[in-house]
Image (spheres, rainbow, N blue to C red):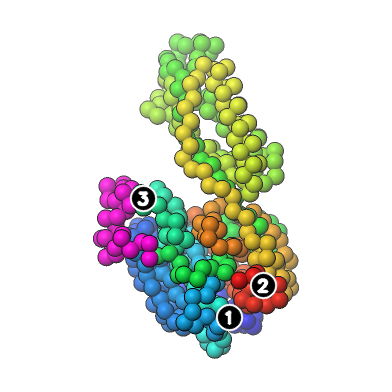
Amino acid sequence: MTPSAALAAARQLLDRSDELARHTDVPGELTCTYLGPAHLAVARQLAHWMGQAGFDSVRIDALGNVAGRYRGRAAAGRQAPCLVTGSHYDTVRNGGKYDGRLGILAGIALVQALSEAGLRLRHDLEVVAFAEEEGVRFGSTFLGSSAYAGCFDTALLDRRDAQGTTLAQAIVQAGRDPQAIAQAAAPPGGIAHYFEIHIEQGPVLLDLDAPVGVVGAIAGSVRRRLRLAGQAGHAGTTPMRLRRDAACAAAEIALYVESRCGAQQGLVGTVGQLEVPGGSVNVIPGLCTLSLDVRAADDKLRDAALADIEAHVAQVCARRGVQCRAEELLRAPAAACDPAGQAAWAGAIAAQGLPVHTLVSGAGHDAMMMARVAPISMLFVRCGAGGISHHPQETVSQADVAAALATAWAFLHEVDGGPGAPAC
Ligand SMILES: [Zn+2]
C-alpha cells in the first residue's frame, strides 16, 4: 500500500467513523447500545459498505454480527481455514467514535484495497463487526464474539435489561431468531489467525511517540464488590475511639489497592465505585460498598495481588470492628497473543520505518474471546488527547490511521503466506 493510498484510506475511515457516530440513542452524544435503533442502523451501514468494498458475501447473524467474506484464491468452494479480523460496533454511554469501530473499518479498508487492486489472498478473509462487546444493555460483555467463537452462553437469553426486556425478546424485536445463534459461529474449516486493530485506549504509545504498537497479551481481570458493615452512629456524640466507621475502612482498603498494585510492573488495581448507601452529613457511615478491579497480563501476578488485598481487608476490618462480604463479579483469564502473529506485526511495523513497541492491553477486547478458538494478535493505534477513551474526546490522527493501515497491509500478506507465516 503506497503512503498516498494509505492516507486516502485513512481519510475515508475517519469520515466513516463520523458517519457512524451520527447514529445514537441519545442526541448530542454517542451512545449506541445493543439492538437499539442506532445499533441496527450502524449494522445496516456496515453491511452496505462491505458490499461496496468488494466482499463476495455479507451476512448479519442472529446476534447482529455483520460478517463479510472476501474469497481467497486457493480456498474457493472448500472448507479451508480463513483469516479473520474484526472488532465491535456497540459503544459505552457517551463514548468515543473509534473504540471498536476503527478495527472494523480498517478491515473493510483492507478488503477494499485488495479488491481495487484485483488481488486475492491465499486464504479467505472474513471481516466481522461484532454486535456487542461493552455489556452496557444486558450487563454481559462479548455477546457478539462469544457467538462467533461458538461459545455463547444460552442462559444469557433470559437476562433482562433495565426495562425488563430479555435478551431473547430483544433479538426477536430486532427481527432475528434466538434459535439461530448457533449458526453465528465461525464457518467450518476454522480460523487460521484472528487479528484485531484497536485504538490503544491509553497514553502509552503517545508517551513513546509511536503511532502503532504490538500487543503482547490482553490482561486478565477480576472484579469484586465489597460490602463493609460497621456501626452507624451520631457524628457529634460518638467518640472517635468507639467508632466502627465503614467508609474509613473502605478508604484504607482503596489506598492499599493503589500502593500494592503500584509497586509492581504490569499490575493495575482500581476502586472505581465507593458509596455510603443512605449516608448523611451527621451520621457515621455504618455501611460502605466499594468495587475492586485488578488486572495483569499474568494471572499468577494478579492473583497474588488479590490474595494480599484480601489479607489487608481482613486486617483492616478486624482492627475496626467491621464485617466484610465480598462477591466476585468477573474472572477473566489473560490472553496471550500468538508469538508468530506478534513477530509478523513487528516485521510489518519495522517495514514502515516505525519503531516497534510491545505493550499489554489493560482493556478487554473481542480478541480475548477469539483466543478460545484461534491464535490471536492485535495492533494498537495511538490515541490523541492524552490517550482518553470511552469518552467523547477520544481521537486518532489521520497519519496514525494511515500508518496502521499500511502496517496491516504488510501484516496481512505476511500471515497469508509470506516467509515465517503462522502455520495454517
Ligand atoms: Zn473496544
Q: Amino acid at mark 1?
A: Arg
Q: Is residue 49 in view?
A: no
Q: Which mark is residue 343?
A: none
Image coordinates of residue 1 in percent, x first then y, are: 63, 81
Q: Which residue is mark 3?
A: 156
Q: Which mark is residue 122?
A: 1
Which of the image's four quarters has the C terminus? bottom right
**Mark before the other along the chain sequence, 2 or 3:** 3
Q: Which residue is mark 2?
A: 421
The reply to whether discs 2 and 1 touch (Cβ–Cβ < 8 Å) is no
Asked whether mark 3 and ligand 1 are closer than 8 Å, the reply comes as no
Considering only vertical position in the picture, is 366 above or below 347? above
Q: Amino acid at mark 2?
A: Ala
The residue depicted at 53 percent of the width and 13 percent of the height is 240
**355 drawn magenta:** no
Asked whether 111 or 298 is in front, the reply is 298
**168 drawn magenta:** yes
